[in-house]
């Protein structure tokens, strides 16, 4: 009697209902990939191997196949929300085991590690000093909440002065008095200031004064520093042409461009040394290569120095290639690493572990981790999450189909029972 055949049909329809129901239940799950139940018939070869007399033995569930099509990208306001637009999986670490996921809803744990809701740590390639990345191995991506290291002004390069000194200006009424700070305004023509930093990240103000001399197209430059406590001190250059009053000279040609001490395009003066309390001495290198003397008022085009104070972490940016940069309140940014992606020759062979992650299997054929935007890897979208690829309308139709199949197999059992009852009633 066909009871067993019908029972296999009921089991198949039930598995189909469960698979479809699981898809519908996860329609709103980030990074979820829908599945479909695949069935094969059960067929027993007839007596003597003659299949023409064999009747099938029903059906069975062959596998539940995952469908790794791309889900829609839903944009958020969280930079740590990541989505892979294309092929690839985020690489996660869980107690030494590698896991893979398309769900990129990440946050920070108490130690600053970038983790998902289950505490699995996101993996990234470490940044090298030359700006490249060590793609041979990956480690936990970690954001440090500690203050960013300061940089003294002299560690980043010269202080660039791009300014114009007024060729029509008069010679100051009074001579410059060395060491008299703040100076008498009648002893100089123009002045400008900018904030600099010592090795401890403390702000100190470097002020330069410009006094036109009696020699045509010549200017004397004097410098002072106001430290972080407000104390003003004169600082002198060690240039060989330093004046007795502490200044050094800039000389311009008839075309208004700097002619001495060194011809354009770049002029680097000798260091002006400042020794802040408790910090390393700061040697200011003053670059006047862009200075001019035209018949227009004194003007500052730009003053550039490359020091900065300490800073706290203010945010994180992740570009399409997965490069992770930390932003600090001092205006600086640091590259922390590059998000690693993995791929499989046969993604359907990955073993689902729940929590929207998969584990490697022999049939998956995992490939070495790589970089977003290269080879067969997609790009990374920061501030977005990949939605489930479940088509709810399609799943509802599947539910109707599975229900009809279940009812039909139940009818087979009912019919077989009627036949059996007829045989029993024969007398």
Image (spheres, helix red, strand yellow):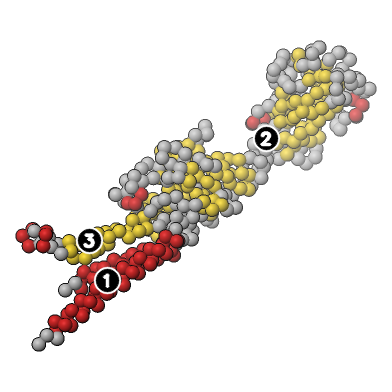
Identify the residue at the far bottom of this view.
427
Residue 307 bears which disc, if any?
2
SS for callout 1: helix
In the image: residue 404, left or right of residue 59 = right
Q: Give residue 55's position: percent from left, percent from top.
A: 15, 64
Distance (Cα) linking label 2 and label 3: 74 Å
Q: Give residue 109's position: percent from left, percent from top.
A: 52, 55
SS for callout 2: loop
Q: Give residue 128's position: percent from left, percent from top.
A: 50, 36
Which residue is disc 3 drawn over? 41
Q: Is residue 208 above or below residue 122?
A: above
Q: Do callouts 1 and 2 mark residues in contact (Cβ within 8 Å)?
A: no
Q: Earlier in the sequence, mark 2 or mark 3?
A: 3
Q: Residues within 10 Å of mark 3 (few under 14, many from 20)?
A: some
Q: Residue at x 85, y 19 (%)?
A: 295
Q: Residue at x 49, y 34 (%)?
A: 132
Residue 409 bears which disc, if any?
1
**Which quadrant of the figure contains the N terminus?**
bottom left
Q: Do callouts 3 and 1 mark residues in contact (Cβ within 8 Å)?
A: no
Between disc 1 and disc 2, the foreground one is 1
Q: Residue at x 46, y 42 (%)?
A: 378
**Residue 47 lies in quadrant:** bottom left
Q: Earlier in the sequence, mark 3 or mark 1?
A: 3
Q: Give residue 43's position: percent from left, percent from top.
A: 17, 61
């Amino acid at each position: 009697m066909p009871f067993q055949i019908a029972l296999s049909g009921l089991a198949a329809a039930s598995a189909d209902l469960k698979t479809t129901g699981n898809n519908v239940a996860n329609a709103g799950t980030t990074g979820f990939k829908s599945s479909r139940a695949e069935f094969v018939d059960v067929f027993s070869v007839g007596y003597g191997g003659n299949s023409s007399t064999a009747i099938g033995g029903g059906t069975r569930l062959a596998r539940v196949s995952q469908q790794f099509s791309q889900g829609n990208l839903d944009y958020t306001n969280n930079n740590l929300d990541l989505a892979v637009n294309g092929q690839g999986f985020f690489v996660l670490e869980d107690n030494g085991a590698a896991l893979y996921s398309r769900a990129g809803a990440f946050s920070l744990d108490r130690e600053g590690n970038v983790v998902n809701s289950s505490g699995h740590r996101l993996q990234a390639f470490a940044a090298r000093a030359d700006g490249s990345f060590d793609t041979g191995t990956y480690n936990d991506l970690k954001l440090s909440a500690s203050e960013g290291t300061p940089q003294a002004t002299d560690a980043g390069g010269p202080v660039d002065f791009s300014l114009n000194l007024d060729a029509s200006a008069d010679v100051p009424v009074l001579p410059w008095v060395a060491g008299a700070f703040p100076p008498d305004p009648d002893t100089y023509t123009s002045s400008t200031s900018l904030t600099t930093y010592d090795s401890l990240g403390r702000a100190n103000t470097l002020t330069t004064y410009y006094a036109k001399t009696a020699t045509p197209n010549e200017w004397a430059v004097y410098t002072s520093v106001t430290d972080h406590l407000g104390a003003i001190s004169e600082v002198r250059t060690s240039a060989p042409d330093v004046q007795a009053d502490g200044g050094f000279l800039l000389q311009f040609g008839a075309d208004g461009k700097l002619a001495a001490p060194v011809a354009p395009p770049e002029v680097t003066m000798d260091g002006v040394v400042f020794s802040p309390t408790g910090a390393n001495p700061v040697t200011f290198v003053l670059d006047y290569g862009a200075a001019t003397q035209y018949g227009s008022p004194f003007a500052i085009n730009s003053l550039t120095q490359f020091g900065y104070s300490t800073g706290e972490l203010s945010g994180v940016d992740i570009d399409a290639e997965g490069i992770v940069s930390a932003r600090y309140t001092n205006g600086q940014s640091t590259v922390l690493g590059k998000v690693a992606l993995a791929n499989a020759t046969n993604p359907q062979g990955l073993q689902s572990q729940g929590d929207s992650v998969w584990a490697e299997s022999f049939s998956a054929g995992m490939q070495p981790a790589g970089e977003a935007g290269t080879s067969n890897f997609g790009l990374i979208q920061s501030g977005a999450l990949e939605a489930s690829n479940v088509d709810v309308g399609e799943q509802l139709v599947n539910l109707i189909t599975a229900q009809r199949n279940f009812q039909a197999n139940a009818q087979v059992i009912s019919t077989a029972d009627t036949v059996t009852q007829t045989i029993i009633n024969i007398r």
